[in-house]
Image (spheres, grey):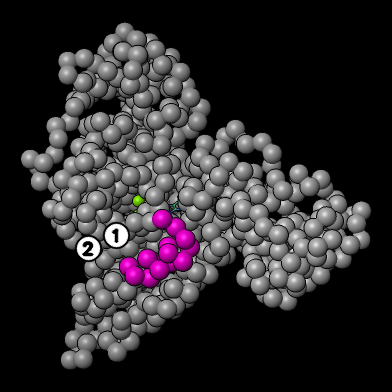
Amino acid sequence: MRSSQYLLSTLKETPSDAEIVSHQLMLRAGMIRKVAAGLYTWTPTGLRVMRKVEQVVREEMEATGALEILMPMVQPADLWQESGRWDAYGPELLRIKDRNQRDFLLGPTHEEVISELVRKEISSYKQLPLSLFQIQTKFRDEIRPRFGVMRAREFLMKDAYSFHLDEQSLQQTYDTMHQAYCRIFERLGLDYRPVIADTGSIGGSHSHEFHVLAQSGEDAIAFSDSSDYAANVEMAEALAPTEQRPQASAEMQVVDIKLKAGQQAADKLAISSSQTLRTVLVRASDEVTSEFVYLVVRGDHELNDVKAAKLAEVATPLEIVTDQDVIGCVDLFQGPWLDYPIIADHSAAVLADFACGDNNNGKWRTGVNWERDLRFSRSADIRNVVDGDPSPCGKGNLRIARGIEVGHIFQLGTKYSDAMKVGVLTESGKHQTLTMGCYGIGVSRIVAAAIEQNHDERGIVWPAALAPFDVVLIPMNMHKSERVKEVAEALYQACLDAGLSVLFDDRKERPGVMFADMELVGIPHQVVIGERNLDQQEVEYQSRKTGEKEKVAVDQVIAYVQ
Ligand code: ATP
Ligand code: MG
Ligand code: MG
Ligand code: MG
């Protein structure tokens, strides 16, 4: 690829609305462009990287024996009515109508559609077990899309589903998928951890999340320093023997605002009778250290920035009880079946969103556990599980780290197959309901997560498996030197012949601009072709990762970068 014919679109300045480094670098390196909140266009560079992730995922899924299919993004409501999720799923589900006023939805996941396929296509035990997967666009109307493609509304997911006659067969496929996930993240060169994610079964292995370790991660994970044990923090808490848990060092109190300032705030927001303004006081010992204000809005599902800003504005004078530990205001939305708090203050947003990240498994239903919400919205001092706690596995102590959830596997059992009557005839001619597993990977999120782990002050440092190009050729003043041009063109052809993906920076740009752009984009191997080195028939090779420079003979370049 020649830069002159490519869409490079790099930006010098860091866009002000991008909070985390991957979002900043994806914009600056010209990988994505925002269309609307949580909706992005992938430009050629971004798409090249995403396709690489997709290909590794596809290869490893196929290696498990899973078969690729493609299901529609638009799904009919009646399937979701059958499973019970049409009513149960919260406002993340985008419900739409067609021209005949029939209900549809944009698929956030595909258990219903796959169940519909399997109940029609599979009739005999002989066809089992069966695993099917797709790599497809999902839509979730995230209450707070942010961090670019990390938490988008439209995103690319690999979702696989498996069908079995019994638990044992499910467990086998689950283990195979677990191993495939480990291979995927290893091949992608990521520092990751599989963690127990199933809050329901103590010590169970019915659900695992795969986290890429990163400070910007929205989740907290706990792992033992002396064994393979790792869990998300909630799970570690559920497993920890009570007596081992340190006492919470702060207590929360929820009160309706009857304070003078609260009333003023309520007046200012013009809150109707169905809405209440409440405060949460956080006390450490006898002292109130923080106060939160939140709004209870019945039947209102939208976090609208204007309202959040307005709330922040009125809440500010209320927050400060002492000058430390102020987190921000909390906007509580009460939907038909779930409540979730949103921290409007950006400084606390990374920590706080953990508390509102995952609502649809029932953890944050009405009667929300404020102590828990606030614990996650605060720093580690009032989390029940703290770094150094004894590990629930009995070996070693827990270390707490932040993680980005890039994959999640579940044993679903007969939850969907019961509701949707997915079964086959067994050997003895009896009808049997199938047992299911499902396995998700956030393909587009992985691109951002990889950047969180692989960057420096000059830009992205792609692991080899993810790089948009293997090699970049940077000719110095090619437009003035015939010799440089000749060698650069010859090297370009040699790279193509060798099957390397190569970017030839043939733009009429200053060398400084070329270097800055290529370091920002993060191509692993740089080959600089300049007059002076050509006297010795040499070029300069630079590794993006180590920054080390070496002179390499022109006829050795291909062997060197391969
Ligand atoms: P999260 O806790 O981050 O909201 P989730 O638990 O809701 O994710 P799953 O239903 O487990 O997500 O979906 C499988 C995978 O899809 C996740 O592990 C994650 O990598 C990815 N994913 C989920 N939501 C998003 C999103 N809004 N943007 C990008 N990727 C996402
Ligand atoms: Mg999750
Ligand atoms: Mg979610
Ligand atoms: Mg999940």
Quarter of the rendering occupied by the C terminus: bottom right
Q: Is residue 190 magenta?
A: yes
Dot 2 crowding, Cα within 10 Å, few <14, some 14–19, many 20+: some
Secondary structure, magenta segment, majority class: helix
Residue drawn at (44%, 34%), measured in percent from left and top?
303
Judged left or right of residue 393, residue 345 is right
The amino acid beneath tag 2 is Ser
The amino acid beneath tag 1 is His
Q: Position of residue 72 (x, y in %)?
A: 50, 67
Residue drawn at (29%, 71%), measured in percent from left and top?
174
Asked if residue 554 can be seen in this view, the reply is: yes
**Tag 1–tag 2 contact (CB < 8 Å):** yes
- Label 2 residue near ligand 4, CB within 8 Å: no
What secondary structure is marked by label 2?
loop
**Nearer the observer, 334 or 143:** 143
* Residue that mark 2 sits on: 205
Judged left or right of residue 359, residue 72 is right
**Nearer the observer, 434 or 135:** 135
Residue 425 picture quarter: bottom left
**Count of numbered marks:** 2
Q: Position of residue 427 (x, y in %)?
A: 21, 91
Q: Is residue 341 above or below residue 273?
A: below
Residue 216 picture quarter: top left
State which region is magenta. 178-191
* Residue that mark 1 sits on: 208
Residue drawn at (32%, 68%), measured in percent from left and top?
178
Asked if residue 442 can be seen in this view, the reply is: no
Q: Position of residue 426 (x, y in %)?
A: 22, 87
Q: CA distance from mark 1 to mark 2?
A: 7 Å
Q: Is residue 419 above or below residue 339?
A: below
